[in-house]
């Protein structure tokens, strides 16, 4: 999702002063053996090493890459992108990409562009190449600008006194870790949790952005971090993440599995929704066991939901990553698979050029991604079932990749 801001439903951190929160996808299968503490290692590769590189319709990723380049070029040249160099290192390739974009390049042109300007480096978690790849989508809910007999569940705007803190601004070792709360008596205190908020803690403050018909769909909208609400007159209100209450994200799938409500191996977004809708009397209390709560804003007119990089996401080509390890805007080639179309069928290969444009609370680690599938029924199916193992390669400007290759192993750039 994130999400992310399409989803930052949970933040992994430990703070000596007090708030400890963690966001993990608790229903996912175990990843292959890796180091206990995630360690990013980048290993030089060749385009010939990328399975499916020549088969991908790379031009479908071009609009996403162009949007990221536009965003990057607005930043100061000296801005660090971590192991991806500085913004200045990306200026030549991005400038050329924006000029080339005007010509609507075909697959061969896009492929040649990356092969000429970039070099692939495989991202590992220590020595482990495989990691977990999940999916998210843009849901559509029924709703109304005002509460009525059908639409009784509010989506709240971000409260004015909600304070979000990037701990990396204070200590380098806390980069990528965040907390949220409200200031009371000069101290940052925890904000209300989900149970308090759904119980009316924010009612009467004018924070209601829109009212929706289904509390279950509202809950899952928070997990996706962005979506559309169809109003009675047919208009679509596009809403997106605008903050989180700072409480840890708890995966409902694990809770339901532990309580014996769902069977192991059958925990998906679809199965969770079905159970909650079939048991409305128990649903509210169950959802409240996830204390995290997401606030929304009106995104206005636009081509798509915005990711954490501040650009519209592209279905099937945008990816949410862990910003602690992965700079936003970097193109990546993913080698994974899609969920099988039906039980017993083979999992289709999913090998394609993508762009890291988003982040999410459950997206943690050097080899961990969340694929944005767009909107609609098929996007929902894929997002709900996507729990696949895969591997990936960053595509870095050739000089940056060469500098990484020349660096000493102890610099943390190579195993």
Image: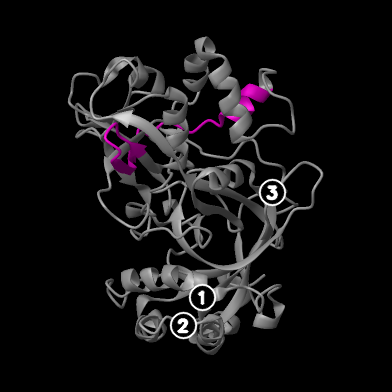
Which of marks 3 and 1 precedes in the sequence? 1
Q: Tell me the element at label 1.
A: helix
Is the residue 170 above or below the residue 203 in the image? below
Q: Tell me the element at label 2.
A: loop
Q: Position of residue 399 (x, y in %)?
A: 49, 87
Q: Is residue 70 visible?
A: yes
Magenta segment: 229-257
**Image position of 107 (left or right of 296):** right
Q: Is residue 334 visible?
A: no
The residue closer to the viewer here, 295 or 228, is 228
Residue labelled with disc 1: 59
The residue closer to the viewer here, 227 or 355, is 227
Residue labelled with disc 3: 339
**Image position of 251 (left or right of 261):** left
The residue closer to the viewer here, 263 or 237, is 237
Is the residue 309 above or below the residue 204 in the image? below
- C-alpha distance separating marks 1 and 3: 24 Å
Residue found 47% across the figure and 16% down from its top: 284
Residue found 49% across the figure and 33% down from its top: 249
Question: Which quarter of the figure has residue 212?
Answer: top left
- C-alpha distance separating marks 2 and 1: 7 Å
- The reply to whether discs 2 and 1 touch (Cβ–Cβ < 8 Å) is yes
Residue labelled with disc 2: 105
Q: Position of residue 165 (x, y in %)?
A: 31, 44
**Quadrant location of the C terminus?**
bottom right
């Amino acid at each position: 999702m994130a999400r992310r801001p399409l989803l930052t439903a949970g933040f992994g951190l430990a703070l000596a002063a007090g708030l400890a929160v963690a966001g993990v996808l608790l229903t996912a299968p175990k990843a292959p053996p890796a180091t206990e503490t995630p360690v990013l290692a980048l290993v030089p590769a060749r385009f010939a090493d990328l399975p499916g590189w020549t088969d991908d319709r790379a031009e479908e990723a071009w609009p996403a890459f162009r949007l990221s380049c536009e965003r990057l070029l607005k930043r100061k040249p000296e801005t660090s992108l971590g192991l991806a160099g500085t913004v200045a290192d990306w200026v030549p390739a991005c400038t050329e990409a924006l000029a080339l974009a005007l010509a609507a390049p075909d697959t061969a042109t896009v492929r040649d562009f990356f092969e000429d300007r970039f070099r692939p480096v495989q991202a590992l978690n220590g020595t482990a190449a495989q990691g977990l790849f999940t999916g998210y989508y843009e849901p559509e809910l029924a709703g109304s600008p005002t509460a009525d007999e059908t639409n009784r569940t509010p989506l709240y705007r971000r409260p004015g006194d909600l304070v979000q803190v990037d701990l990396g601004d204070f200590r380098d070792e806390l980069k990528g870790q965040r907390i949220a709360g409200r200031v009371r008596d000069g101290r940052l205190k925890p904000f209300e949790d989900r149970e308090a908020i759904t119980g009316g803690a924010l009612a009467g403050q004018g924070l209601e952005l829109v009212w929706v018909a289904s509390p279950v769909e509202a809950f899952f909208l928070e997990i996706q971090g962005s979506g559309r609400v169809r109003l009675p007159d047919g208009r679509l209100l596009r809403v997106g993440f605008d903050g989180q209450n700072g409480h840890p994200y708890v995966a409902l799938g694990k809770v339901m599995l532990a309580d014996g409500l769902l069977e192991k191996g059958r925990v998906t977004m679809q199965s969770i929704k079905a159970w909650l809708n079939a048991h409305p009397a128990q649903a509210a209390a169950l959802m409240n066991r996830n204390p995290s709560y997401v606030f929304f804003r009106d995104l206005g007119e636009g081509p798509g939901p915005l990711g954490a990089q501040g650009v519209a996401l592209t279905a099937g080509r945008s990816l949410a990553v862990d910003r602690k390890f992965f700079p936003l805007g970097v193109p990546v080639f993913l080698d994974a698979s899609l969920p099988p179309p039906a039980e017993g069928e083979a999992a289709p290969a999913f090998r394609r050029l993508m762009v890291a444009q988003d982040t999410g609370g459950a997206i943690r680690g050097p080899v961990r991604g969340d694929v944005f599938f767009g909107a609609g029924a098929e996007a929902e199916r894929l997002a709900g079932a996507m729990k696949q193992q895969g591997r990936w390669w960053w595509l870095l400007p050739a000089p940056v990749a060469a500098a990484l290759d020349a660096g000493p192993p102890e610099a943390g750039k190579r195993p």
